[in-house]
């Protein structure tokens, strides 16, 4: 029974992910903003992982293959996801000097996992990347009124929080909320309702009042 | 008998000259770096990398001297100096890393600027957590050879005296690590010490054209 619930939740997550990818690709066609391509690639990898999870829930298959030592395919996908996440952050912050850092972090974490079967370094890395990128993305997004950055920041934050729980239902619930937050970001929700340009709004209202006064 | 005396004298002279002149050259380069900072308001990254390379080299020659000529050669110090990631290997690896970093900066390959440093730090952290150090010697050899090759390449391409000076210095210092003959090794040490003094005092200007900023 639990597996069916998990499967349905994962399917909803997957559907939301596909909608988000289509939205970002549609926006990219219009604006040619490279940030949207970065988001699409990240989501595509995420959806690949989601398909993996759906297969697990559907057929009760375990496709987490051991590559060497403690290194599994699931961990490799995780490392790729975090690498893209960090690249995304460095791209947004315009830090090309740090572009190679995620690659080396992933490489050494993978190698470390082959040598020593301990997941602690990966957990520490994941926490730093999740919360660090969430903080910078939300902060920068608010400052520049960039809804997509806020959406990504919230996505990383909520996903990171969910990853702390060992119960699958809780984790998938957090994943769903995270995807909804990102979808809202791609749809311009935050620009419209959260980070409203108060000065601009004020100017519009003042002009409107001024016109009324002149008319009177 | 006389030959032994000459040899031991040569060894002492080479070690003493390196332990005196290399830190002195480092200080001169540090002074130039600070002077440059006062004039321009910010650190010149190329000068900073060269200065860091020389700091490493100073640490290496000072510890080497202390280990050979003072009673500091205890088992603990020996492990600290000659261990897998001991002072000797680490300082040489850092010099190789800085050599590559210098090349990336001079050639303005922005994405690669810090990559050699990331690779080395990763290797060091991996050693701390897992004890894995099998790549260190290969890393030293590869970075050393790559640094020398690309430094000559950069020096010719950019007509840069700094890169050429570091390339010559690296060539002599690096080749010295493969030489077993004590006399030849001592002569090479004296040669690169003399070269470092000339370089740090700013008298090494074989290429007259300035680097385009």
Image (spheres, rainbow, N blue to C red):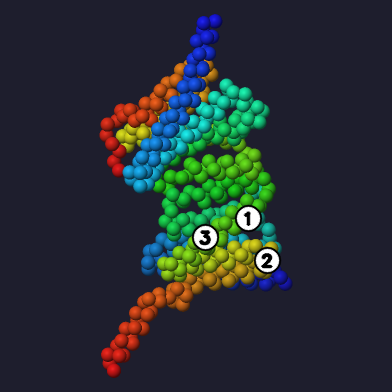
| 10 Å crowding of disc 3: few (<14), some (14-19), many (20+) | many
Q: Which mark is residue A19?
A: none
Q: Quadrant of residue B22?
A: top left
Q: CA distance from mark 1 to mark 3?
A: 15 Å
| Rendered-image quadrant of the N terminus of chain A | bottom right
Residue in front for this viewpoint, B37 or A213:
B37
Are the residues at dot 2 and dot 3 in contact (C-beta closer than 8 Å)? no
Give the SS element for disc 2.
Answer: helix
Query: Residue beneath label 2, please?
Result: A168
Give the SS element for disc 1.
Answer: helix
Nearer the observer, disc 2 or disc 3?
A: 3
Residue in front for this viewpoint, A20 or B8:
B8
Q: Residue at x 41, y 67 (%)?
A: A144
Q: Quadrant of residue A127?
A: bottom right
* Left or right placement of residue A60 versus residue A131 in this view: right
Give the SS element for disc 3.
Answer: helix
Query: Residue beneath label 3, please?
Result: A133
Residue in front for this viewpoint, A161 or A15:
A161
| 10 Å crowding of disc 1: few (<14), some (14-19), many (20+) | few
Are the residues at dot 1 and dot 3 in contact (C-beta closer than 8 Å)? no
Subunit under mark 3: A
Q: CA distance from mark 2 to mark 1?
A: 17 Å
Subunit under mark 1: A
């Amino acid at each position: 029974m639990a597996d069916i619930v998990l499967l349905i939740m994962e399917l909803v997550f997957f559907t939301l992910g596909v909608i988000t990818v289509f939205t970002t690709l549609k926006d990219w066609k219009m604006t040619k903003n490279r940030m949207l391509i970065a988001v699409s690639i990240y989501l595509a990898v995420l959806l690949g992982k989601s398909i993996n999870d759906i297969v697990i829930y559907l057929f009760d298959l375990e496709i987490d293959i051991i590559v060497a030592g403690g290194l599994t395919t699931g961990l490799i996908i995780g490392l790729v996801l975090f690498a893209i996440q960090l690249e995304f952050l460095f791209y947004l912050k315009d830090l090309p000097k740090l572009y190679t850092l995620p690659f080396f972090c992933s490489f050494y974490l993978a190698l470390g996992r082959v040598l020593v079967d301990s997941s602690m370094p990966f957990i520490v890395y994941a926490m730093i990347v999740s919360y660090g990128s969430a903080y910078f993305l939300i902060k920068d997004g608010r400052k520049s009124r960039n809804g997509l950055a806020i959406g990504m920041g919230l996505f990383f934050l909520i996903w990171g929080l969910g990853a702390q729980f060992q119960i699958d239902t809780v984790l998938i619930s957090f994943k769903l909320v995270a995807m909804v937050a990102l979808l809202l970001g791609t749809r311009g929700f935050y620009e419209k309702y959260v980070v409203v340009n108060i000065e601009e709004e004020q100017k519009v209202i003042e002009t409107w009042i001024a016109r009324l006064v002149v008319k009177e | 008998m006389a030959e032994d005396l000459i040899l031991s004298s040569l060894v002492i002279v080479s070690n003493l000259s390196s332990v005196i002149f290399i830190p002195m050259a480092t200080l001169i380069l540090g002074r130039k770096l600070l002077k440059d900072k006062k004039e321009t308001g910010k650190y010149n990254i190329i000068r900073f990398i060269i200065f860091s390379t020389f700091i490493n080299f100073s640490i290496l020659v000072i510890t080497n001297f202390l280990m050979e000529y003072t009673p500091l050669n205890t088992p603990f110090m020996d492990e600290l100096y000659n261990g897998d990631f001991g002072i000797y290997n680490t300082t040489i690896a850092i010099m190789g890393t800085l050599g590559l970093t210098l090349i990336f900066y001079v050639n303005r390959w922005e994405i690669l600027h810090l990559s050699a440093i990331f690779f080395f730090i990763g290797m060091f952290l991996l050693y701390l957590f897992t004890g894995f150090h099998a790549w260190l010697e290969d890393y030293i050899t590869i970075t050393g050879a790559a640094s020398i090759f690309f430094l000559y390449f950069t020096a010719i391409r950019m007509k840069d005296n700094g890169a050429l000076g570091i390339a010559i210095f690296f060539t002599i210092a690096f080749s010295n690590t493969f030489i077993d003959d004590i006399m030849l090794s001592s002569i090479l040490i004296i040669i690169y010490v003399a070269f470092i003094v000339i370089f740090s005092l700013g008298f090494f200007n074989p290429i007259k054209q300035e680097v385009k900023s």
